[in-house]
Amino acid sequence: MLLNPRTLAYDHCRNLKLQIDNTEPLKYFQCDVCRKGYPIKSVFGTCTTTKCITYGKLVDKDVGFKKTDVCVSGGGVFVSDIGAFIVTDDLCVMPYTSANSIRLLTDHGITDQSCLEDLKLDMGREEILHLLKMALSLDSVFTYLVFNRISSIRDLVVPSQRSDIDQTVLMKKDVSLQKSTGKLLFAEARGDFILLLFDILSFPLGTVVGELMKVGVSSLTCINNIFKSISDMSVRRYLKSQDIKDILLKPQFPPIHHLFQLKGTPLHYGDLSCKDLKIDKGLLKQSGMFIVTDDLIITPSSSYSTLCTLNNKKVSFDDIETYEISIGSTEGLKILNASLRSCSTLTDSLEHLLKK
């Protein structure tokens, strides 16, 4: 669930001309009782180590259910057969028309064709994955791909412009600061904060971008532009259907996210309904204390792990200050945003709490 998350878009992506992964289709499992037809509405899971929420038995019987391949007819998997599109350096996507071409050139102050040069890029699996990496870090992805030149990176965290995020869920955590550098070294946290970090792995990127843009904390210019481009595209003329548009902008995911307060839509396949088989006991086997470093390495807390962290960073004991901070939905979204671009996630998202 965490290392190989799936959404409904996955079934469409398997029909793309260029595959960026070789993940096998999901398999679905049931316990012995459910496999025999009880209850009438089958409950299944995708992991053989979980237990049935109805009967408490191990979910280890292969259902043998396979989804029908998504039919692709005309055009691409997501777009219609309208033709070509223009993709700008910061990943704005627009239909290819003479008007759009001219406007794009004039917006960049280009009036003479002699200033232009045509270049061809061969885009394979590695290039697409590299493009995604650059889109999470830079604002000019094609400039980097062509010239291998890193443009200046803006501040990694954009302060929220809105204050209407629900802050009813708060957790208090101890964080250790290195006085000489002003950077957070690590946080000591129980399972609630660890679950928040684990949840990040199961979010579809479309959900992340939409939620961050909604509350004004997104700093992912290129990914934001893709999201806006899809939002502005008309159905049937450019996108194949409203369902396709919803899959891209509102991807479905299991309803396991507590602190972020995102409402997941259960996945339904015919008469089978996917339910969260681990929600009663949680993701962690047992509660306890954990150490979370500035770059989000998570280890069980112990004197040894704390000393190792300080030793690896060459930090002396007299260079440390400890603070107690409260983390709620606002901070959770800032951590989510910073985790996509920063190697100092805790510092970039939580340091403002230390200045109060």
Image (cartoon, rainbow, N blue to C red):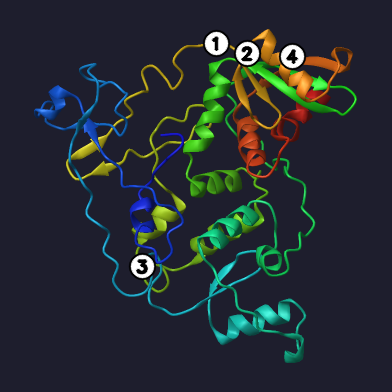
Q: Which is more toward the observer, 31 or 324? A: 31
What is the quadrant of residue 160 in the picture?
Answer: top right
Mark 2 or mark 4: name the one nearer the start of the chain. 2
Q: Which mark is residue 307?
A: 4
* Residue visible at 42% across and 72% down in the picture: 238
Give the SS element for disc 4: helix
Of tags 2 and 4, the one toward the viewer is 4
Of tags 3 and 4, the one toward the viewer is 4
Name the kind of residue labelled 3 in the image. Answer: Lys
Residue 257 placement (x, y as % from top left): 46, 30
Q: Which mark is residue 301?
A: 2
Q: Which is more toward the observer, 254 or 326? A: 254
Q: CA distance from mark 1 to mark 4?
A: 18 Å
Name the kind of residue labelled 1 in the image. Answer: Gly
Q: Give the residue number, with chain letter if any, for mark 1.
A: 288
Name the kind of residue labelled 2 in the image. Answer: Ser
Name the kind of residue labelled 4 in the image. Answer: Leu
Residue count near mark 4 (Cα–Cα under 10 Å), binned few <14, some 14–19, many ≥20: few
